[in-house]
Structures are given as C-alpha cells and as structure tokens.
Image (cartoon, helix red, strand yellow):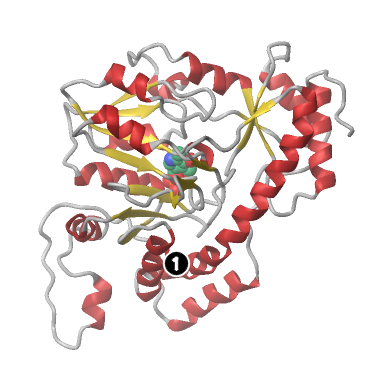
Amino acid sequence: MIPVMLPMLGEEEAKAVADAVRSGWVAQGPRVAAFEEAFAAEVGAAHGIATSSCTTALHLCLYQLGIGPGDEVVVPSLSFIATANAVRYCGAAPVFADVDAETGNLAPSSVAEVLSPRTRAVLLVHQGGQPADVEAMRAVCGDIPVIEDAACAAGATLRGRPVGAGAVMAAWSFHPRKLLTTGEGGMITTDDAGWAARLRRLREHGMSVSAADRHASTTIVLETYDETAFNYRLTDIQAAMGLVQLRRLPEIVRQRREMAALYHELLSPLGLRAVGDPAHGTTNYQSFWVTLPESAPALPEVLAGMAESGVSARRGIMAAHLEPAYAGRPHIPLPVTEQLTHRSIILPLHHKLSSADQHTVVDAMARALRLEPARP
Ligand SMILES: *Cc1c(COP(=O)(O)O)cnc(C)c1O
C-alpha cells in the first residue's frame, strides 16, 4: 500500500534523542530553548514559544488575547477540527466562514460577512501549506487581530518571505502528518516580546521563573504563580528531534514541490485540477489535493477503488460544521467548504514516493474515476 504521508526521519534524529536522554535533562530545557530560537529564525519571527502541540498553541494564542465567554472567533470550517476546538477551549464561539475554491483558505469576503461587534479574532489557516493572503485578510479585519494557524505551513512562502514573518501570532504543528515532526509538538511565533514572555508563563503553570532557568541559576530563586495557567510544555527529547528536523526543511520542501510538479504533469491530460501555488506565494504541498470532476463517483467509492489498486488516498480536508461536535450551530451557507470536503481527495506525497509510485497513484485515480489511464 502506498501511504499518504511518511515522516522523513533518520539516524540523526535517533542520535539526537539518545543524546538528550543521556544528558539527564529530558523536560523543557536547553534543547527547547535552542529549538525555539532556530525555528523562529527560520520563519522570520523574533520569538518562538514551544508547546505540546499546535492545538495547545492555538489555545494559548486566544487565551493570551483574553478571549472568553461571549466572544466570537471567525474560523474556517474547512480545517482540522483543532482550529475550531481551540476557540471553544476559551469558552468563546467559533463562527464559520467559507473558503476560496482555489486555495482552500478563508475568503476575505466571507469573513467580512460574519464579522460582528463580538468578533475578537480571526483564525486564518494556511491550509495544507497553501499560504493564505494575510494582507488581504487584515484589510477586511481592521483592528481585529488575525491569528495564523500555520500548523501545516513550515517552509511555505508569502510574497517572498516565509509564512510566519510579520505574523501577530502564528501557531505551528510538529505532528507526523506535517512536514517537520517531534512526534507531538507545537510552537507559537510572534514579534511581540511582552506577549512572548507571557506565553512562556502560560505554558508552564503561570510560573514567574521557568523550571529550567531556576535550575540553571547559581542563586536561590523562588518562583511565584501569578495566574492559573497550563502545562503545555514540549520536552527536550522532542526538541532534540526538532532541531535535526528543522535542518531538513529546505530539502523536504524541495522534494515535495518536485513531486507535486510531476503530479501536475500527469493529472493535466486527464483534465483534473489540483492545488498549486497561489499568485501571492509558494506552497510546501503539505497536502496535495485534487478536485473530483462532476462525473466522478461518490468520494468513498473513489477512495475504495484506489485502495484496491494499493493506493491510500484520503478524503479532502474535513469540515468541522458537518461533524457531530458542531451539529446545530448556526452558520452562513458554506458551499465551497462543502464542495471541497466532499469532492476533493488528498494524494500520497512523501520522500519515499518514486516517480513510478506517482504513476501508479494517478493510474489508480484515473481507474477509480473511470477516466482513460494517464500514460504519456
Ligand atoms: C494538524 C493541525 C492542527 C493540530 O495540530 P496538532 O499539533 O496535532 O495539535 C491544527 N490546525 C491545523 C490546520 C492542522 O492541520
């Protein structure tokens, strides 16, 4: 079976993790600090705050803004469910807006439609590594902060800069389904030093001095707990892995873009439309999705057909408003979201995929769609 995704891991990660274990310091410590600094530099931000996941990173971003009951946060329904859940963790209401058919990213015109006096933030997702047009979104949001869910977007670019550069706050994921992995893990990046300092306290029980700093100090330091907060820390074991992964990022992005180019070449004679670079940036192809033609059978049938040919494809990005957890929530019509979630599929893309595998994938898809096979 050809899998959809495989993390790019090697001996270097294994050795780095073993070194962390042998050092005797396995909780958040010097390796987390080094990973934060290196990651922030990579995405063009002044500060990095490592967290246990992107989900907890998103929660802290909203919490940091003081968002709570009675507040609204605009989110795309077309996203992994953690985006909307983070809003609920604060007791606030996620308000769904629709996305653009080409990019799968929140459409500014749809966001403008749902802004209200209660809107406290917009969570803009760079879906599947497709850079969202942050400037266009800010233009409709005015003073409302645009927080970036960059879970999938490490290595994507926006107007010649890395996604994350200039972000108010951006949240990142190191789950193995993304380009960089630490097993589980996340990061917040921001240019605001005051916010960074508070976010560091919020992820560590509200402690005035971090356990690592207290340990490193030559004098006695007594911490205080100034507010009720969370344990959302990353470990040094994970950060050791992250530091190695980060060095691989340019190569991972280069490979994925090369493979995506071959997919485009194979799909275009079939008349199939796939995600690509938007006018304002470059994608890292964390997800490579193809829109099914009108004539195609139902999505489960297409996936089953491909599985019979040994290809593991996935349904399009999920839509939170269609899940039982969000049933009954009023929302504006979300036709593009529903079209993309029901009528697109994600193709395998990872470093072990050969060009022969890519031909197999496209042939399997053509068969499942009952199109002529793609043999150049
Ligand atoms: C994966 C993902 C998340 C959640 O990331 P975790 O690190 O698994 O918590 C959030 N938002 C988006 C858009 C994602 O793709």
The x, y position of residue 176, in whole percent, is 56, 51
Query: In the rendered view, would you say 322 is above or below 147?
Result: above
Q: State whether label 1 is within 8 Å of ligand 1.
A: no
Query: In the rendered view, would you say 78 is above or below 166?
Result: above
Task: Examine the rendering and report whether any part of residue 22 can be seen.
Answer: yes
* Front in this rendered view, residue 241 or 43: 43
Q: Residues within 10 Å of mark 1 (few under 14, many from 20)?
A: many
Q: Quadrant of the N terminus?
A: top right
Task: Examine the rendering and report whether any part of residue 73 can be seen.
Answer: no
Q: Is residue 343 left or right of residue 374?
A: left
Q: Is residue 45 left or right of residue 270?
A: left
* Front in this rendered view, residue 300 or 284: 284
Residue at screen point 57% across, 44% down: 286
The x, y position of residue 73, in whole percent, is 27, 30
Query: In the rendered view, would you say 319 is above or below 33?
Result: above
Q: Quadrant of the C terminus?
A: top right
The x, y position of residue 228, in whole percent, is 15, 52
- Give residue 292's quadrant in the image: top right
Indicate which quadrant contains ligand 1.
top left
Q: Which residue is mark 1?
A: 239
Residue at screen point 69% across, 49% down: 258
* Front in this rendered view, residue 336 or 220: 336
Q: Is residue 171 left or right of residue 196?
A: right
